[in-house]
Amino acid sequence: MKEIRKIGFILTLILIFSGCEELPDPAGLRGVAVVPAITDVDPGIFDSNDLTNTFVQFVINTPEGTHPDKITVLGSYQDNYERVVLAEATTFPSTVRIKASEIAQKIGLSLNEIVNGDIFTFELLTKANNLSTYSTAALIVPVACAYDVNRATGSYHSVSADWNSEGNITISADPDNKYKVYVTGLEEIEGLVEDLGPLVMYINPATYAVTVPEKAIASDGWGYGSVSYSGTGVYSSCDGSYVMYFEISLSDLGSQGTYTFTLTRNP
């Protein structure tokens, strides 16, 4: 459980888009700093099974009407903040692709030192109006396994200590979208008839974050109306497990709170 939570935490991408950290500029402050954004991240992980060829890709955007002289992409490993130069862009929007082998070489790492759970950080250094600034748009890139739909589906064991629920469920993939999966059996564990299911979950292909739009999956929940689930979570691409935070609601009583569910593949 502790390891799953750790993987869930590190598989989260952090994109922050407000303000900037000023660096000393011998020319003094002139004009207004340009605050760029990192968008369209895909893929957003380094594949631990193919570190020689794996890459991340994203787009650097600048606010409309701004024309920075140059934006430099800097990279760091873990919490060392080496900030090695990885790429430079002078026209925007600009698509950037960075290989794991490239950043490892520049930092001085061998590929066999990099393991699942490691984190790389990409930052943007912007030069505009004689002002150099670090943007707070930072991209956190974890090392993880590539997505395999067969690993993300099948027979699972669901456990929720705080909802007092445990039993087997099934996860299947949409035939047209491998990142859209269906969960059946959550209410059958409770002894209810799951006549409105399945529950639909969406896996973000770049970050493996999971979102669950609210959906009623059983029409009768212990006499208090329909039972609905919604929430968020994270998919662990290396072992196929999920850590989900489901908000459970009864139509007659409203929300019953948010509960942690761990979904692990059955042998």
Image (cartoon, rainbow, N blue to C red):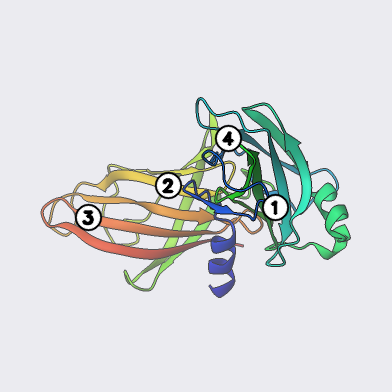
Q: Is residue 51 visible?
A: no
Residue type indicated by callout 2? Thr
What is the C-alpha distance between the residues marked 4 and 2?
18 Å
Mark 1, residue position: 145
Mark 4, residue position: 40
Q: Earlier in the sequence, mark 4 or mark 3?
A: 4
Q: Quadrant of the C terminus?
A: bottom right
Residue type indicated by callout 3? Ser
Q: Where is residue 159 drawn, in percent x and y?
A: 43, 67
What SS does tag 1 mark?
A: loop
Q: Where is residue 238 drawn, in percent x and y?
A: 66, 57
Check contact, mark 2 vs mark 3: CB within 8 A. no
Q: Nearer the viewer, mark 4 or mark 2?
A: 4
Q: Where is residue 77 drawn, in percent x and y?
A: 73, 61
Check contact, mark 1 vs mark 3: CB within 8 A. no
Check contact, mark 1 vs mark 2: CB within 8 A. no
Q: Nearer the viewer, mark 2 or mark 3?
A: 2
Check contact, mark 4 vs mark 1: CB within 8 A. no
Check contact, mark 4 vs mark 2: CB within 8 A. no
Instruction: From this view, report whether residue 155 is shown above or below residue 86.
Output: below
What is the C-alpha distance between the residues marked 1 and 2?
20 Å
